[in-house]
Image (tube, rainbow, N blue to C red):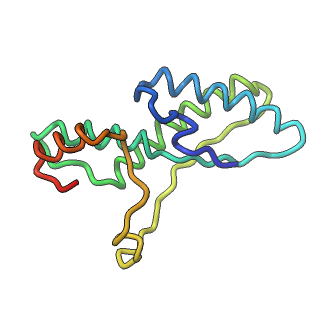
Amino acid sequence: MALGGNALLKRGEPLEAEIQRQNIELAARTIAGLTVNWRVVLVHGNGPQIGLLALQNSAYDKVTPYPLDVLGAESQGMIGYMLQQALKNSLPQREVSVLLTQVEVDATDPAFSNPTKYIGPVYNEDQAKTLAAEKRLGV
């Protein structure tokens, strides 16, 4: 079963741990019902979560920013921890395990020339222009 990052933190919701925990607990109760008949393997997205880490990362200019793979591991750890806790609370009689993964990226993948999957918050046009001017980025 796959939970998208936006299932864990719905679009427009504040990037707060407690809101994610509530969404994860809701998902865990549903997933718990599936374990009556199946063994469940669960994977999850992390777009909003890794986006928040990237924003936090860029706000502290005293050190070299952490690379995206490290931010990915941080987000997996947080989400995995919350999922394991919620699933164990819903399924006290079952064993629950969490694994970190690594992503293999092909630097020549043509998708890099037309990115469609972003990380982090969504900005309206005015916000995007303001941020682009502040950070000297293109919009």
Q: Residue at x 24, y 43 (%)?
A: 128
Find residue 33 and report its image quarter. top right
Q: Residue at x 48, y 44 (%)?
A: 76
**Does 52 sit left or right of 96 as displayed?**
left
On the image, the x and y values in percent for residue 123 come to 32, 39
On the image, the x and y values in percent for residue 46 come to 47, 45
Find residue 75 and report its image quarter. top left
**Does 50 sit left or right of 88 as displayed?**
left
Q: Nearer the viewer, residue 35 or 100?
A: 35
Q: Residue at x 10, y 42 (%)?
A: 134
Q: Is residue 1 above or below residue 115?
A: above
On the image, the x and y values in percent for residue 43 come to 61, 49
Q: Residue at x 51, y 55 (%)?
A: 101
Find residue 55 and report its image quarter. top left
On the image, the x and y values in percent for residue 118 come to 39, 52
Quarter the C terminus occupies:
bottom left
